[in-house]
């Protein structure tokens, strides 16, 4: 297996620079709320820190320029174009897995095995000099020459088409490619050219565990407490590898994850690069606020999130279909249709020193109505408002009320997601009337008529009284809790 890991350099910054060249070569950052989420390498050289505040950055580097990056439309559009380009350029024989907006794993095993053309020679020698080697003293094999040349070619193509630079790692696995790709940034590529297990282990041993792909916070925390290690920086591959047996890891993490971690610590990773869908199977938008003190506050945030989500649905899934509408005019069509919409919340407890009980529902979903796809008749705002009226207001109120009943009503985050994408749109309302008259009723905000929310019946079970474990309907929660207060 030969895998390339690609990570774009300061992606948000580069996106802005690709459409506005005046931003190139200067200290520049992209800001979300008051935090600098991406910082150009020029600003980093001046000491500006990623995820630092704008006011701090201004003190160190007064001439730093910033743009607001809360709207992700530009980054998503460029990311989509890059992915479509790579898929097209590399062909179906080359699985490409996309992580977030700017990272890719590419399995080049089959491309690398194809016969090379002679004209590659010059490009090969060029890419050779640009490539960092983990073991400088090991001469490249013929196969490795090919890997570095393919990687250099991909990076060159990306730069030519998008004016974006990236850093790449090349090895025989996802984990190791990611690790070596991070060694030389920006605009560099690194090859793991070890020749023996001993060389590989010597390279891997000094790394802190959290630098390894697949060693997330939860895993590293558990390993740290298993080894009685307070400072995570001290927890290296070497210490975990030499002090934990396969049995120890299997006991702590179960046989599958335990065995995976055991092998990872020895540089063995069999993760397969999974071809990503060109279009995501779920899209979501969320927002947070410290000031949600009523269901109406929650609804206000819900409306703005829903509008942004509908806009994104159009950007990613709708295309104009020339001339296939009735009377031959062009109309907009969806390539895939989400069949459900989900509201999720995160909240903090209003009772000091307690956590929100695990059984308080955090998420409810419903089927979407057909009007969501009527893009030629309604504006984005109207479609968002309809979706809110059809189901989202009511789902959000249920979540809010369940929180109130559990002393956990301090909503902080609202996330709305379209899920379960299918080919065709949902049935038109007329079919629904035939199937079930009740399901076409309109939900009024103040109404407690929950029957009109299709698909919510099952989730209704999620509201359980924390004191007596009775199942409650959302509109009975308040009176039920009052009953406990009086009775106890
Ligand atoms: Mg990146």
Image (tube, rainbow, N blue to C red):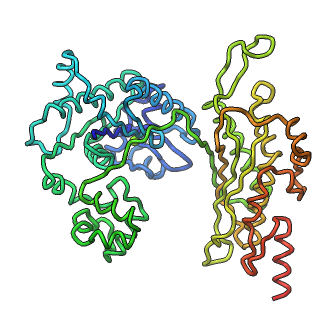
Left or right of 51 on screen, residue 209: left
Left or right of 446 on screen, residue 11: left
Badge count: 0
Left or right of 249 on screen, residue 336: right
Left or right of 221 on screen, residue 75: right
Which residue is pictured at 33% across the width and 40% down the height? 5
Q: Is residue 276 above or below residue 236?
A: above
Instruction: Please state which of residues 467 and 427 is positioned toward the viewer in this rendering.
Output: 427
Quarter of the image where the N terminus is located: top left
Where in the figure is residue 279, as x and y percent of width and height?
Answer: 55, 34
Q: Is residue 137 above or below residue 150?
A: below
Please, which residue is most extreme toward the bottom here? Answer: 488
- Ligand 1 shows up in the quarter that is top left
Which residue is pictured at 18% across the width and 52% down the height? 200
Which residue is pictured at 80% across the width and 55% down the height? 296
Question: Can residue 22 be seen here?
Answer: no
Quarter of the image where the C terminus is located: bottom right
Where in the figure is residue 169, as x and y percent of width and height?
Answer: 28, 41
Quarter of the image for residue 304 reads top right
């Amino acid at each position: 297996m030969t895998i390339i890991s690609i990570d774009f350099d300061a992606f948000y910054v580069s996106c802005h620079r690709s459409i506005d060249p005046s931003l190139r070569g200067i200290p520049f950052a992209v800001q979300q709320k008051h935090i600098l989420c991406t910082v150009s390498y020029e600003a980093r050289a001046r000491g500006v820190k990623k995820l630092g505040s704008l006011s701090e950055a201004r003190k160190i580097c007064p001439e730093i320029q910033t743009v607001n990056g809360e709207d992700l439309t530009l980054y998503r559009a460029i990311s989509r174009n890059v992915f479509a380009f790579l898929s097209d350029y590399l062909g179906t024989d080359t699985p490409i897995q996309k992580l977030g907006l700017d990272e890719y794993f590419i399995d080049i095993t089959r491309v690398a095995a194809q016969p090379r053309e002679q004209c590659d020679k010059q490009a090969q020698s060029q890419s050779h000099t640009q490539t960092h080697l983990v073991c400088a003293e090991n001469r490249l094999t013929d196969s490795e020459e090919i890997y570095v040349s393919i990687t250099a070619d991909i990076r060159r193509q990306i730069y030519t088409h998008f004016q974006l630079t990236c850093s790449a790692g090349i090895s025989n696995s996802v984990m190791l490619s990611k690790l070596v790709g991070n060694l030389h940034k920006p605009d560099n590529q690194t090859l793991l050219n070890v020749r023996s297990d001993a060389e590989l282990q010597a390279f891997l041993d000094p790394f802190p565990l959290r630098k390894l792909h697949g060693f997330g916070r939860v895993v590293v925390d558990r390993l740290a407490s298993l080894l009685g290690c307070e400072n995570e920086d001290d927890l290296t591959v070497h210490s975990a590898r030499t002090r934990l047996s396969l049995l120890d890891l299997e006991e702590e993490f179960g046989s599958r994850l335990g065995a995976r971690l055991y092998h990872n610590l020895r540089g063995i990773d069999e993760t397969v690069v999974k071809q990503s869908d060109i279009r995501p199977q779920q899209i979501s938008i969320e927002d947070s606020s410290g000031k949600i003190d009523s269901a109406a506050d929650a609804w206000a945030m819900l409306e703005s999130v829903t509008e942004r989500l509908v806009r994104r649905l159009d950007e990613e899934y709708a295309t104009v279909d020339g001339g296939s509408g009735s009377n031959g005019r062009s109309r907009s069509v969806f390539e895939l249709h989400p069949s459900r919409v989900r509201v999720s919340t995160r909240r903090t407890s209003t009772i000091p020193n307690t956590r929100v009980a695990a059984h308080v529902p955090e998420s409810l979903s419903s089927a979407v109505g057909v009007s969501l796809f009527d893009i030629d008749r309604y504006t984005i705002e109207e479609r968002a408002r309809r979706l809110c009226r059809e189901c989202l207001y009511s789902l959000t109120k249920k979540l809010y009320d369940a929180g109130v009943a559990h002393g956990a009503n301090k909503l902080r985050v609202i996330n709305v997601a379209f899920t379960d994408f299918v080919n065709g749109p949902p049935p038109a309302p007329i079919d629904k009337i035939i199937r079930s008259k009740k399901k076409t009723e309109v939900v009024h905000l103040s109404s407690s008529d929950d029957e009109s929310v299709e698909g919510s019946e099952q989730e209704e079970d999620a509201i359980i009284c924390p004191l007596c474990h009775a199942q409650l309907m959302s509109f009975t929660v308040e009176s039920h809790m009052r009953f406990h207060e009086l009775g106890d």
